[in-house]
Image (cartoon, grey):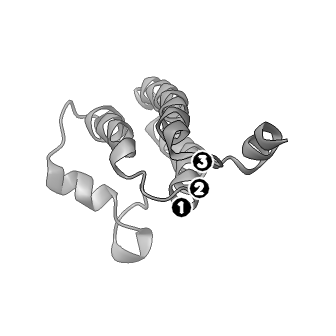
Amino acid sequence: SKQWYQRRVRGYIGCESGLKQFVDEQIASWKDDVEGLCKIARSEPQLAYSAFLYGTSKRWNYVARTTPEISELLRPLEYIIKEAFVPAIVGKQYIPDKLRDIFALPARLGGPGDQ
């Protein structure tokens, strides 16, 4: 069935009207995950960062690659990463946009690989 396939592939298959609902549901789950990692980062920043990099971020990167034209819908996720997660792992309350840009760089370009 279509629902089974959608769950197995973890991408969106269907009409455009359901796309926003699908992405919003995914973002709500990912935001919960990132908020949990922010709590962990207070005492174990390396652990939180590893969990983010090798687990949490892989799920939305996959959806972003397999679901066209959703970059605008992912803005709430980028907001929580910039405003909560990155400050939590570096031990600051605020980080400037330039530092966030560095965190977005892949390791081969001198960044930590945080998409």
User: Residue type at mark 1?
Assistant: Arg
Q: Quadrant of the N terminus?
A: top right
Q: Residue at x 60, y 47 (%)?
A: 59
Q: Tell me residue 105's x, y (percent).
A: 34, 65
Q: CA distance from mark 1 to mark 3?
A: 10 Å
Q: Is residue 73 left or right of residue 94?
A: right
What secondary structure is marked by label 2?
helix
The answer to whether the residues at label 2 and label 3 have Cβ atoms under 8 Å apart is yes
What secondary structure is marked by label 1?
helix
Q: Tell me residue 45's x, y (percent).
A: 44, 37
The answer to whether the residues at label 1 and label 2 have Cβ atoms under 8 Å apart is yes
Q: Tell me residue 111's x, y (percent).
A: 35, 65
Q: Quadrant of the C terminus?
A: bottom left
Q: Quadrant of residue 108?
A: bottom left
Q: Is residue 6 left or right of residue 50?
A: right
Which of these two is toward me, 49 or 26? 26
Residue 65 marker:
1
Q: Residue at x 58, y 59 (%)?
A: 66
Q: Is residue 98 left or right of residue 73?
A: left
Q: Is residue 109 above or below residue 25?
A: below
The residue indicated by pointer 2 is 62
User: Residue type at mark 2?
Assistant: Tyr
What secondary structure is marked by label 3?
helix
Looking at marks 1 and 3 on the same chain, the residue that comes earlier in the sequence is marked by: 3
Q: Tell me residue 2's x, y (percent).
A: 78, 43
Residue 59 marker:
3
What crowding class fits label 1: few (fewer than 14 Cα within 10 Å), some (14-19), or many (20 or more)?
A: few
